[in-house]
Every structure is written in structure tokens, then in C-alpha cells.
Amino acid sequence: MGHCLCCTGALAGVLLLALVLPAAAQTDAKTAPAESKGSVAASAGASKLQTLLEANVKAEWDAFQKKDKKAYSDLLADDFAAVEDDNQGMRTKDAAAAEVDRSNINRYNLYALKVIPLNPNAALVTYELTMLFPPKVKFRFKRVLVSELWVKRDGKWLERYYQETHVR
């Protein structure tokens, strides 16, 4: 139970930042000249980050689909933590990587992926994920809303935190 409260607090903090920072950016955008060089560069940087992190998220789910534990682990920070919708509590990097061997994802679909830069070394990524499982399993589909915190360490973007919520 203590882990859940801690996770809820951490996620609430990340979500608060996600709400405050875009509002602050909009305020700055209203006061800045329409075609300033800084805003064009910032937009290009945000687009580059969107492309990079979207590729990382796809690589993450491709690794699960192909049962490639090393490829998945390479995307995770050493202090990675995950909370899934299965009521099994917090997972560390090692525990999350161990799930790759048990994965039975046939296909997946990412929808509405958004990248919200929090600072030059952190970004919040949100998306909806639909997973398709083999025909003979009890549940064929699973849909979740996902929030991930990505951090840049030693020049490499790594996933630091993963939270999913089941969609009915």
C-alpha cells in the first residue's frame, strides 16, 4: 500500500508538471514575436524529440512482441519503475524485463501518442495502446492508457517510469 501512495504522489507530480509547463509555454508564446528564431528552433527540437521518443516507444513494444529482453532492457533506466493494471504492484527494471519472456502479444496498436517536454532532460509520453493476443487465450484484446517518463542520461533517452490504466 505504501508503494501505491508513493507512486500516486510521483505520478501526480509528473502530471502537474505536464499541465503547468505547457500553460507556461503558451503564455511565453503569446508574448513572443510570431516568427522568432527561438520559437522555430524550439518547435524543431520538440518535433525531433517527438520522433525520437515515438521510435523508442515502438521499439519497446516491438521488443515485447518479439520477446527480445535485451532490446527492451536497453531502453530502461537502471532505476526504472513500472505500475501495470494487474494489481501486482511496482516492478523494477529486472522484474519488467523478466515479463518479456512471458509475453504473448501478437500485435499492438499505438494511438494518440503525445510527447510533452518537461525540461531538456525529461519528457512525459502518453498514448493509448491496444494489444492483440493469440486466438486461444481467454482475453483477446487489452486496451490501456499509458504514461511514461523518459529521461536523458549520458546523451541517451531512457524510460524511467511506466504507468498504465485499463480502458474498458
Image (cartoon, rainbow, N blue to C red):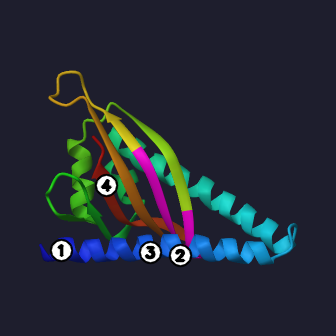
The stretch in magenta equals 116-128
- Between circles 1 and 3, the one closer to the viewer is 3
| Secondary structure found at label 3 | helix
x then y, percent, for residue 116 = 55, 64
Q: Mark 4 and 3 residues: CB-CB less than 8 Å, in contact?
A: no
The vertical placement of 145 against 31, above or below, is: above
Earlier along the polypeptide chain: callout 2 or callout 4? 2
- Quadrant, the N terminus: bottom left
| Residue identified by numbered label 4 | 164
Residue type at tag 1: His
Mark 1 vs mark 3, CA separation in Å: 20 Å
Q: Earlier in the sequence, mark 4 or mark 3?
A: 3
Q: Earlier in the sequence, mark 4 or mark 1?
A: 1
Task: Give the amino acid type for the residue marked by disc 4 in the picture.
Answer: Glu
Quadrant position of residue 106: top left
- Please say if 31 is above or below 56: below
Decide which of 159, 86 is in the foreground and name it. 86
**Is disc 2 in contact with disc 4, using a CB cutoff of under 8 Å?**
no
Few, some or many C-alpha atoms within 10 Å of disc 2 (few <14, some 14-19, many ≥20)?
few
Between the residue at mark 4 and the residue at mark 3, the CA separation in whole angstroms equals 17 Å
CA separation in Å, label 2 and label 3: 6 Å
Residue at position x 27%, y 71% in the image: 8
Crowd around label 3: few <14 · some 14–19 · many ≥20 (10 Å)? few
Say which residue label 1 marks: 3
- Of badges 4 and 3, the one in the foreground is 3
Residue 20 part of the magenta segment: no
At 23% across and 21% down in the image, what residue appears? 135
Q: Helix, strand, or loop for circle 1? A: helix
Residue 5 picture location, percent across and down: 20, 75
- Name the quadrant of the C terminus: top left
Asked whether 89 or 79 is in front, the reply is 89
